[in-house]
């Protein structure tokens, strides 16, 4: 069932953090695929494991975290099986990152251009100075940065410019996949829009695939192609963004979408408590049942499987049952 | 990978910094003039006492006392003494030593200073380099396990007082192994001068005092550096550098040490000023003829002129090294600008 266009396939990825009171399963059996040239949004509240899941994909999980099991197939190869040196060489060439805090993600004692040059020269060897300079200038133009920042230091740039410098850096080696980890959350709304548009432009021009982590459902709706909803380390639903907003299949997705305010209507916040259970001791069965308005006895007995309830719309919820024709219908409670 | 923007030191900034430099020296010099004068000990009496102790009896004691006071200007009113003192500082004339009468203090300082500066600069620079390297490797995640055991173990010496570690080194390398001479600044039978024999003798004699200083002080730098490295290690830019697939050694050097070392450099500048006083006890046990020994003897002998002269040298060195760091810092940390303006 593997899609020929699939560029990245994550299967049953488990990342645990060791604590004295037991493991925290921050990413517990997450599976999704990323198709060539698409933006996949990963949403969920704080602590839902979005960054951990992509940290597993990028293999940047440090102690006390560890990747327990799963496969991450990038361009046909499982990168979790790579040794450290092979992984280091793969980084940025195939898999790059737009970091969460662009404010602190640039080395304060190096110029912007030096920090782009070092990644190019590490992976492609020594470059002629003129060609390197021209290549970096091209990257700047691509993300709308002025040439004068070439020999500037990070502290001389505004937050939005730093974020765009990070985007320029992320495309320096023409990667297959870029992970944008809350790339816009630290910026004001105007700059958020500019940065999001820059990412869309990059996607169109370079045909690169993005995994975009965020918690701003409004911004996500405008930028991403498909949306994956995470809750406490598990993926609850994944669907095209249109389908997700039109007919959310999981009760949690419903709540998330209903909470997006509109200009004409002020809605009461339906999410008010955050993740309530102790992550070291998650509830049996469905991870969401403690907060689910439709929780049933079966929900505490077994973890629901991810099933395709509509074409291209997968959900993990006991509300959906197969009828006599073999198609899934949602039970009314 | 080209460098950044070139910087020049603005004249106005330089002027301000120089003004601060002279003001610092002036205030500090005034304080060290004032402090001995608060002491109840009369240096003229103390000197006479020494003479009396040697001869058993001094004729015309009152007359000699008065003469001594006149000679050292102690009979003048305090404000006149103070003005004379300030004038003498400007021309580096600190009068004559009371203990080694009538050797000029300036001459004694000039004789002791090169020895201490030579010994201390070499040992302090070595300690700074080794200490920071050790600190960096203690914090670095890629450091081989064995090194992570060896380095902290080596720092045990930091908690041993320098006299004891000095004695230990003397026992081991001089008495037992006979590799280095026991004491002194150079051999008794070599002629001082720019000849190879003398230089060799100086290095041979300096090795153990230098080693004992390095062994005792590198832990200070190592512990500071380890803390700074641990902080830098969790910075976003180091995490991104790893995600970029840069080589671990390059990340260590260009992203981590380069940033972690900055506060250490400031601390180092302050240490440079203090190093002219030497490791007093180290110089003492190795009978090394440097500033430390000079100050030690001067304190024992109540030799005010020497103490004042030596303190003045310390003040000058501290203020000068702070000035130097102020002027150089913008070149090592691009976020710092001379005078704040663009």
Image: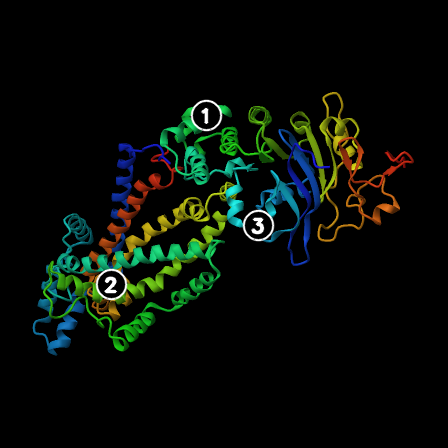
- Tell me the element at label 3: loop
Name the residue that disc number 1 marks. A138
- Tell me the element at label 2: helix
Q: Chain letter for mark 2, please.
A: B
Residue B146, percent from left and from top? 46, 63
Q: What is the C-alpha distance between the residues marked 2 and 3?
A: 49 Å
Name the residue that disc number 3 marks. A62
Q: What is the C-alpha distance between the residues marked 1 and 2?
A: 61 Å
Residue A137, percent from left and from top? 43, 26
Q: What is the C-alpha distance between the residues marked 3 and 1?
A: 34 Å
Name the residue that disc number 2 marks. B292
Task: Determine crowd level at label 3: few under 14, some 14-19, many 20+ residues with C-alpha closer than 10 A.
Answer: few
Classify residue B31 as left or right of residue A166. left
For residue B155, above or below residue B16: below
Residue under the point 31% across and 63% down: B213
Residue B168, percent from left and from top? 32, 73
Q: Are discs 1 and 2 less than 8 Å apart at CB?
A: no
Residue with the most extreme right position: A324
Classify residue B288 as left or right of residue A232. left
């Amino acid at each position: 069932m593997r899609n020929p266009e699939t560029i990245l396939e994550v299967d049953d990825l488990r990342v645990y953090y060791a604590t004295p009171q037991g493991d925290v399963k921050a990413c517990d059996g997450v599976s999704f695929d990323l198709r060539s040239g698409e933006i996949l949004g990963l949403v969920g509240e704080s602590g839902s494991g979005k960054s951990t899941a992509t940290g597993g994909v990028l293999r940047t999980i440090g102690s006390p975290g560890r990747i327990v099991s799963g496969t991450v197939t990038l361009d046909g190869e499982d990168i979790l099986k790579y040794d450290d040196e092979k992984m280091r060489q793969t980084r940025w060439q195939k898999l790059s990152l737009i970091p969460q805090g662009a404010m602190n993600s640039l080395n304060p004692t190096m110029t912007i251009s030096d920090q782009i040059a070092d990644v190019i020269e590490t992976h492609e060897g020594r470059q002629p100075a003129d060609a390197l300079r021209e290549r970096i200038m091209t990257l700047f133009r691509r993300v709308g940065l002025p040439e004068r920042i070439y020999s500037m230091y990070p502290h001389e740039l505004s937050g939005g410019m730093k974020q765009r410098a990070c985007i320029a850096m992320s495309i320096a080696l023409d990667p297959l996949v870029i992970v944008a980890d809350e790339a816009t959350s630290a910026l004001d709304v105007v700059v958020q829009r500019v940065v999001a548009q820059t990412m869309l432009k990059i996607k169109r021009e370079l045909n690169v695939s993005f995994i975009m982590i965020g918690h701003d459902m409004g911004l996500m709706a405008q930028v991403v192609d498909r949306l994956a909803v995470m809750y406490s380390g598990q993926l609850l639903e994944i669907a095209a963004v249109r389908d997700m907003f039109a007919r959310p299949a999981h009760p949690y997705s419903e709540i998330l979408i209903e909470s997006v305010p509109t200009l004409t209507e002020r809605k009461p916040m339906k999410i008010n408590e955050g993740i309530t259970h102790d992550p070291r001791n998650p509830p049996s069965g469905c991870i969401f049942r403690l907060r689910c308005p439709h929780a049933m006895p079966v929900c505490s007995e077994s973890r629901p499987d991810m099933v395709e309830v509509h074409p291209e719309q997968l959900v993990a919820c006991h509300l959906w049952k197969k009828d006599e024709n073999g198609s899934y219908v949602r039970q009314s409670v | 990978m080209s460098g950044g923007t070139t910087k020049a030191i603005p004249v106005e900034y330089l002027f301000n910094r120089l003004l601060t430099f002279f003001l610092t020296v002036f205030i500090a010099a005034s304080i060290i003039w004032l402090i001995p004068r608060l002491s109840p000990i009369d240096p003229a009496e103390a000197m006479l006492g020494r003479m009396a102790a040697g001869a058993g009896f001094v004729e015309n004691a009152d007359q000699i006392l008065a003469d001594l006071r006149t000679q050292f200007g102690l009979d003048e009113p305090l404000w006149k003494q103070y003005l004379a003192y300030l004038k003498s500082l400007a021309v580096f004339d600190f009068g004559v030593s009371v203990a080694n009468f009538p050797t000029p203090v300036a001459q004694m300082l000039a004789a002791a200073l090169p020895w201490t500066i030579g010994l201390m600069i070499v040992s302090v620079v070595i300690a700074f380099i080794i200490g920071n390297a050790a600190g960096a490797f203690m914090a670095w995640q890629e450091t081989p396990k064995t090194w992570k055991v060896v380095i902290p173990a080596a720092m045990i010496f930091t908690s041993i007082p320098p006299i004891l570690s000095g004695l230990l080194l003397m026992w081991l390398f001089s008495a037992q192994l006979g590799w280095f001479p026991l004491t002194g600044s150079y051999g008794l039978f070599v002629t001082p001068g720019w000849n190879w024999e003398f230089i060799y003798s100086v290095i041979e004699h300096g090795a153990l005092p230098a080693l004992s200083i390095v062994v005792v002080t590198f832990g200070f730098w190592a512990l500071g550096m380890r803390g700074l490295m641990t902080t830098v290690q969790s910075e976003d830019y180091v995490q991104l550098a790893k995600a970029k697939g840069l080589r671990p050694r390059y990340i260590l050097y260009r992203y981590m040490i380069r940033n972690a070392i900055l506060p250490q450099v400031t601390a180092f500048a302050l240490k440079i000023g203090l190093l002219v006083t030497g490791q007093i006890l180290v110089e003492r046990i190795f009978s090394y003829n440097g500033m430390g020994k000079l100050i030690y003897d001067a304190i024992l002998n109540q030799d005010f002129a020497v103490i004042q002269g030596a303190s003045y040298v310390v003040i000058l060195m501290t203020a000068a090294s702070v000035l130097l760091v102020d002027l150089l810092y913008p070149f090592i940390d691009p976020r710092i600008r001379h005078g704040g303006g663009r």
